[in-house]
Amino acid sequence: MAITPEEVRKVAYLARLLLSEDEIAEMAAQLSRILEYMEILRGVDASHVEPMAHPLELTNVFREDRVAPSLPREEALKNAPKHDGECYLVPAVLGPA
Amino acid sequence: MQRPYEIIIGLEVHVQLLTQSKLFCSCSTEFGAPPNTQTCPICIGMPGVLPMMNRRAFELGLKTACALQCEIARFTKWDRKNYYYPDLPKNYQISQYDLPLGRNGYLEIRSPETGQSKRIGIIRVHLEEDAGKSMHDERAGKADSRIDLNRCGVPLLEIVTKPDLRTPAEAKIFLQELKLLLNYLDVSDCNMQEGSLRVDANINIGVNTPEGPIPTPIVEVKNMNSFRAVERALTYEAERQYQEFLETGRRLGQVPKQTRGWDEEAELTRPQRTKEESSDYRYFPEPDLVPVVVSEAEIERIRTSLGELPQLLRERLETTYGITPYDSDVLVSQGRALVQYFERVATLCGEGKLAANWVQQEVLRFLNEHQVSLDAFPLPPERLAELLIMVRDRKLDTRRGREVLARMLSTGESAEEAVASLGFVDVGDAEIEKICRLVIAQNPKTVADVKAGKIKAVGGLVGQAKKINPHVDPAKVREMCLRLIEETA
């Protein structure tokens, strides 16, 4: 199954990756090879195998609904490239969410 | 009004669950805190942290799925929904994709047009985390947007209906019924102002043609901030789609699904960004959370703990106390506490309809006027019942009953004490008959009018009787006079 440069551009955009034309061609080839490998796995008869939702056998891990102190605001904002002491500041988001 | 089209509506509702802490961390969910004071490394997506499921949030979700008659997933897991937006610091939202908590349920509503019950299908109910809040500067593009992440990670339940709703009014009724159910379950306070209930709608229309109905492209309508806005936005949008169909002839499948936002001021919907296809979210299983297995016994335990829910409660009140669907609807919509109050009063005074009238008119009026809830109502049900027994036995007429109630509320006196303080005397039937015979004898002209069919004229006799003894029950006097006049006819 061959991946087209157009499809690479689309997934790159969704992952917010900026790729050059050379990289796009390279990725298209590599992604195609990965999917070819998956095709081999598709050939295995797995009809009697339960789908695996998680690699751990563990289930039902909960915490109780109790409040604990949050981070002080200045701590939370500290790593932000830009803030006004109250909020994170980001370049204006155009149009409604 | 016959429309030249049928409307098809499905709703997507998000409700905030009533938990103390967030879905995956211990930050508070309290509304209204200063920006960015309720966050921690987990909810703001720092590297290396591990989310951990809030047991209460899970149980509230399960409770709702059970109350909506869903098939409950015995095995449920979480998935990452990937997208980039500044209010989503992890760049993915933890949600449920292919194994939601519940699916294939329904909620019954009473159709406003026909009065008939109707089942609205529920496609799925799943748990997910909320995103933060972006605040945009009025001078768009000039200044930075400000981001508050307090809401990040707050537990939400997403409830998706089948496209079973046929009118905007029906959509509103559904939302009211859903909200009531969630209130009865103590799952959510459903406060739209605080964003704890949010509604998006998918709507299209089937335009009637001789060849059968032609469906128009589906539009998702957002930004509706009240149930009234939902009704108005959907009414507008259906008509807009009809006009667009007349102009362009475009039908379902010919254009991609559009998202439009309701503009409350301008009273119209405007196009928003095109919706990404669901595969664009590149869902994959959340590796940081283990699945949850729900046992048959646990589902049974939750089912039996749901309590009496609005629809069945209404029916029971109607059959037990002989009240009308209107009465039961008003009482039940006020919540469990008022229903319990009503039931106690009705049982003690022995007349359901009388109790329903007084609770709706007098108790609710007091609560509305004073803007308080029932626990601030000064009279316990026993006290109100004492008064209603007097009214039932016609020792007090309704008007005097109200005066007695007003006095009981202001002074704290019992019904009997308030009657005495007001100087109300119960006039015996024999005394009433004596007075009636007197006024009949004194007013031959009025009696003649009544005999001639002007029943209203009897009011004059009632007035005369009240002058003779202000304590007589006007309704009793009226009945007695009419009976005596008929006897002498």
Image (cartoon, coloured by chain):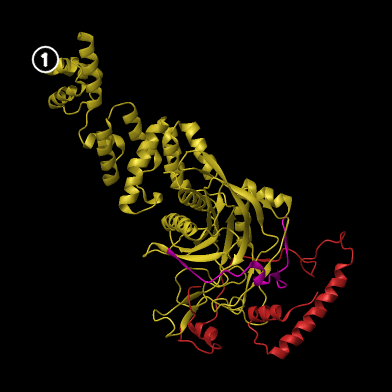
Chain colours: A red, B yellow
Q: What amino acid is labelled 1 in the image? A: Pro
Question: Relative to residue B204, is residue A36 drawn left or right?
Answer: right
User: Residue at position x 50%, y 32% from top?
Assistant: B319
**Does the magenta segment cover residue B119?**
no
Q: Position of residue B148 (x, y in %)?
A: 49, 77
> Residue at label 1?
B444
Residue B306 seen in the current view: no
Q: Which quadrant of the figure has residue B93?
A: bottom right
Quarter of the image where the C terminus of chain B is located: top left
Q: Is residue B2 above or below residue B146?
A: above
Q: Position of residue B48 (x, y in %)?
A: 68, 81
Q: Position of residue B285 (x, y in %)?
A: 72, 69
**Does the magenta segment cover residue B285?**
yes
Q: Nearer the viewer, residue B424 or B305?
A: B305
Q: Position of residue B142 (x, y in %)?
A: 42, 85
Question: Relative to residue B470, is residue B189 drawn left or right?
Answer: right
Quarter of the image where the N terminus of chain B is located: top left
Q: Nearer the viewer, residue B53 or A48?
A: A48
Q: Is residue A57 above or below residue B332?
A: below
Q: Identify the element where label 1 is drawn.
A: helix
Q: Which quadrant of the figure has residue B227?
A: bottom left
User: Residue at position x 66%, y 82% from top?
Assistant: B47
Q: Nearer the viewer, residue B213 or A40?
A: B213
The chain holding disc 1 is B
Question: Relative to residue B57, is residue B266 drawn left or right?
Answer: left
Magenta extent: B269-294
Estimate how packed mark 1 is, as few (under 14), some (14 to 19) or many (20 or more) residues with alpha carbons within 10 Å.
few
Q: Nearer the viewer, residue B113 or B274?
A: B274
Residue B433 seen in the current view: yes
